[in-house]
Image (cartoon, rainbow, N blue to C red):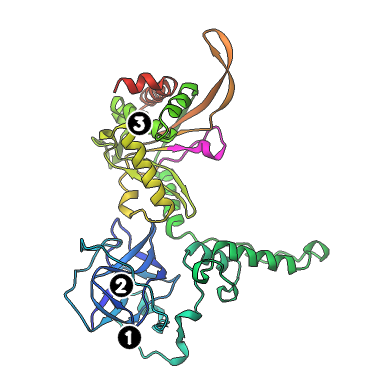
Amino acid sequence: MPDFRLPDLGEGLTEGEIVTWLVSVGDHVSIDQPVVEVETAKAVVEVPCPFEGVVSARFGEPGEKLAVGSVLLSVGAPESESSGNVLIGYGTSDTPRRRRRPRESSVQIASVLPSEHLSSTLGHPAPAEIPAARTAAVGAAPAVISPLVRQLARENGLPLDRIDGTGPGGVIRRADVERELAARAASTPDPALAPAPAPAAGAGRRIPLRGLRGAVAEKLSTSRREIPEATVWVDVDATDFLAARAAMPSVSLLALLARFTVLGLKKFPELNSRVEGDEIVVLDQVHLGFAAQTDRGLVVPVIRDAQSLTTAELASAIAAHTASAREGKLAPTAMTGGTFTVNNYGVFGVDGSAAIINHPEAAILGIGRIIDRPWVVDGQLAVRKVAQLTLAFDHRVCDGGTAGGFLRFVADCVESPITALADL
């Protein structure tokens, strides 16, 4: 009876949190069939099983963290050849895979192993005898797909088994949780009519710094500790920038800015670098990161070899990566290895930002909102579309002259985009 252990997560990740089991005890699994969704510090990914057979035991429940090497499943006969231990989120077979949904009659068994066995990276616990009191029919379990819905209910102390799901098949949606919270609030006496209690020590809502949020916090803290950054900015007339965007419906403003950034890095390669020890490593390829806001927080997908892409190809790659990031399906390898980052913080309705550099990169470029402002054109005052460009850079890799030259080049491209694109 082979045990399937949580495989090497790659990119320095050493643990994952179980989000959703995709199979139940008694289900038959095929080679490379996804069996569980795991949240890492990079993304929520499906883990494929390298064995074929019948699931005889599951180890770990949604919300539990498991270290790499911990047993996930035990698979009994019938068996076939293993595909090998795989990297998380990837199978080893080119054959299209189909997710098998738990059967109505299958039994979902809670783990009865002590937590120390689950957290051991090398332990090989034998499946324990499962008491009848710990078994429950799958149909009796709350139907929740989204980890965000589960987290919202948990943070507000709302039991999922008391919520009526309105989604397909009775799936509990975020709106269902919010409806129950609103009903609970409406039935609670007005606190303004009661004496205010003394604040308890440690009172307040606590948000664990783990998963994606924890990874972002660690990276930003490292950036602040290690990078002596400086910031320069410039206001630009973005009237023609908007006109160029309107003439190319498939190209976003961020994609145009990314294109001009790549051109600027070709002229000022010092900003496409990183510091390693006592050396500055100027990189040949531009792996362009861009900030994308998702329900799980801010992520930075990376477009590899952006210097070799056309404007249309760059726009298409940004759109595809953004969609995958917001669906939580972006592979961990697609969010690492960036050499420079661009950010459109204008979508938040702000004019400027002193952004934190995405360590270990050397710079980050951002654009604020584009609004009507008075602007002098050919000696005459006019109303133009104006935005602010901001560049934060590692002062170890270059001085203000290089940073200012790069920012001015990008600003000129924004103000005369047709000319910049025609020179390609």
Residue 35 pos. (x, y %): 33, 71
Q: Distance between the residues labelled 3 and 1?
A: 55 Å
Q: Which residue lies furthest to the left in this view?
A: 81
Tag 2: residue type? Thr
Residue at horizontal 40 percent and vertical 22 percent from the top: 417
Residue 38 pos. (x, y %): 38, 65
In the picture, which quadrant includes the C terminus?
Answer: top left
Question: Dot 3 corresponds to which residue?
Answer: 259
Q: In which quarter of the image is residue 215?
A: bottom left
| Upstream in sequence: badge 2 or badge 3 | 2
Q: In this view, does 212 lie to the left or right of 397?
A: right
Tag 1: residue type? Pro
Extent of the magenta region? 343-357
- Label 1 secondary element: loop
Given residues 371 and 283, the one toward you in this image is 371
| Upstream in sequence: badge 3 or badge 1 | 1
Which mark's residue is nearer the viewer, 1 or 2?
A: 1
Question: Dot 1 corresponds to which residue?
Answer: 127
Q: Decide: few, some or many residues near mark 2? Use Cα within 10 Å; few <14, some 14-19, many ≥20.
A: some
Tag 3: residue type? Arg
Question: Dot 2 corresponds to which residue?
Answer: 121
